[in-house]
Image: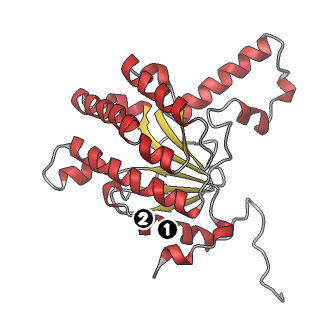
């Protein structure tokens, strides 16, 4: 089946979020260092970013480095940081060619000055691109994000800038790192695990979930298109009862 041709353009999810899992296991299964899996994972990022642009996804959010990832072996963390810096530079032609604006959510202050400089340079160079926002979750976890949001709200209440009675779901959303974009319509996780791993916990309340057994480096454009077709074949009810078939 040609999944690209099967996609209904008018029903493409506006926001797709991906937990890119399986880089390390992909490498270990081949007797390679885990860092090699991350290098191959970058190739998959490039493939899926272009595929998302091709079908009209407006926001693509990738879980690239969690707050928990700081607990990995230092050699692996160092390799990831070097890879991040080089990618932010080397992928700039891809961003500019496809009109991609780079965004970053997460605790940027947890990164070294060199990494922060690379982030800021990439953000500045792509800020006028309008075709798609590529959102990298770096130094991110949903609990970190929610804690920061609640802390900011508490501070504003204390300063008299926000009334406690005014706090509702919409108001909380304004304080989240993702306030500039809609909640994900589709959450994809590769690597065979079926959990969300502290990712966008508030935002995925009504997202459709798609779990793939394929390790991220092997995730292809066709698999991405298949996930969108699968999404389009579902009925999103947002807590409502199923729609009645025609004539019933």
Q: Is residue 216 left or right of residue 205?
A: left
Cβ–Cβ under 8 Å for marks 1 and 2: yes
Name the foreground residue: 147 vs 113.
113
Position above or below: 163 against 136: above
Viewer can see residue 196: no
Quarter of the image holding residue 14? bottom right
Q: Residue at x 65, y 50 (%)?
A: 205
Residue at the extreme left: 31
The residue that disc 1 covers is 225
Foreground: 158 or 85? 85
Residue 155 position, x and y percent, is 72, 14
Answer few, some or many: residues within 10 Å of disc 2's Cα (few below 14, many 20 plus, some between 14 and 19). Answer: some
* Residue 134 visible in the shown view: yes
**Residue 190: x, y in percent?**
40, 57
Residue marked by disc 2: 221
Helix, strand or loop at mark 1: helix
* In the rendered image, the vertical position of residue 100 relative to residue 219, given as above or below: above
Q: Dot 1, crowdedness within 10 Å: few (<14), some or many (≥20)?
A: many
For residue 144, above or below residue 22: above
Q: Secondary structure at mark 2?
A: helix
**Residue drawn where x is 55% and y is 71% of the image:** 230
**Is residue 193 left or right of 196 when viewed as pictured?**
left
Q: What whole-number distance in Å separates the C-alpha atoms at marks 1 and 2? A: 6 Å
Q: What is the quadrant of the N terminus in the image?
A: bottom left
Q: Is residue 171 left or right of residue 81?
A: right
Question: x, y percentage for residue 54?
Answer: 53, 62
Q: Residue at x 47, y 53 (%)?
A: 49
Q: Residue at x 44, y 47 (%)?
A: 94
How many numbered marks are there?
2
Percent across and percent down for residue 61 are: 53, 46
């Amino acid at each position: 089946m040609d999944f690209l041709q099967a996609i209904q353009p008018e029903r493409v999810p506006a926001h797709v979020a991906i937990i890119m899992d399986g880089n390390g296991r992909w490498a270990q299964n081949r007797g390679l260092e885990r860092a090699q899996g991350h290098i191959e994972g970058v190739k998959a990022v490039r493939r899926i970013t272009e595929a998302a642009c091709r079908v009209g996804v407006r926001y693509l959010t990738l879980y690239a480095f969690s707050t928990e990832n700081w607990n990995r072996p230092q050699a692996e963390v160092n390799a990831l940081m070097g890879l991040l810096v080089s990618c932010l530079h080397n992928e700039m032609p891809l961003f500019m060619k496809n009109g991609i604006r780079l965004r970053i959510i997460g605790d940027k202050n947890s990164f070294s000055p060199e990494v922060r400089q690379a982030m800021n340079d990439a953000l500045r160079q792509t800020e006028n691109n309008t075709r798609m926002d590529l959102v990298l979750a770096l130094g991110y976890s949903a609990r970190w994000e929610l804690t920061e949001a609640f802390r900011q709200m508490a501070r504003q209440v204390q300063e008299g800038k926000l009334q406690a009675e005014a706090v509702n779901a919409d108001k909380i959303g304004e304080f989240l790192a993702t306030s500039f974009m809609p909640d994900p319509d589709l959450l994809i996780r590769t690597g065979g695990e079926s959990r969300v791993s502290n990712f966008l916990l508030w935002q995925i309340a009504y997202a459709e979930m798609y779990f793939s057994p394929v390790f991220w480096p092997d995730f292809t454009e066709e698999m991405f298109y298949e996930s969108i077709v699968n999404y389009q074949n579902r009925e999103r009810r947002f807590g409502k009862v199923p729609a009645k078939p025609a004539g019933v």
